[in-house]
Image (cartoon, helix red, strand yellow):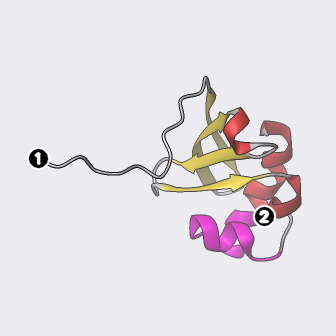
Amino acid sequence: MSQRPLLEDVTQDTSTRFVSFTAGSHRFELAIMKAEYFQNQSLVINLPKNRQGLLDEENINRDGYLEHLFQLSAMEAEELRNYLPYLL
């Protein structure tokens, strides 16, 4: 079997926080991972939808960003947007 080339192979200690909450009419189950590799962002994983993205305070407030990233309605995204600054 031939060796497969890697573009990058990095090992780091991470901190992962699992958070479940209801906001308005929607329930959110998130995993929030922090590592030096992500610089000043956090990897946020929407566990039920299996969608993830790197977030910081700047991009969570960008119009349409959370809606697209996590496939949320405008109302669901606004509910999540209200919680994320406290979680990141």
Question: Is 84 on the left or on the right of 68, as rendered?
Answer: right
Mark 1 Cα shell of 10 Å, populated few (<14), some (14-19), many (≥20): few
Mark 2 in CB contact with mark 1 (< 8 angstroms): no
- Identify the residue at image location x=47%, y=52%: 7
Q: Within 10 Å of the Cα at label 2, are there few (<14), some (14-19), or many (20+) other Cα atoms?
A: some
Q: Quadrant of residue 74?
A: bottom right
Q: Which mark is residue 49?
A: none
- Percent coordinates x, y for residue 40 in the rendering: 82, 43
Whether 13 is drawn above or below 44: the answer is above
The residue at which mark 2 appears reads as 78
Q: Secondary structure at mark 2?
A: helix
Q: Earlier in the sequence, mark 2 or mark 1?
A: 1
Query: Which residue is under mark 1?
Result: 1
- What residue do we see at 48% from left, 39% from top? 9
Residue 7 colored magenta? no
Task: Give the main secondary structure, helix, strand or loop, of the magenta stretch.
Answer: helix
**Which residue sits at x=62%, y=67%?**
69
Query: Which secondary structure, mark 1?
Result: loop
> Would you say residue 75 is visible in this rendering?
no
The answer for how far apart the CA atoms under marks 2 and 1 are is 50 Å
Which x, y percent locates residue 79?
76, 58
Question: Residue drawn 70% across and 44% down?
Answer: 38
Residue 30 pos. (x, y %): 59, 43
Q: Quadrant of residue 24?
A: bottom right
Q: Is residue 20 above or below residue 70?
A: above
- Region of the chain picked out in magenta, as a range: 63-77
Q: How many marks?
A: 2
The quadrant of the picture occupied by the C terminus is: top right
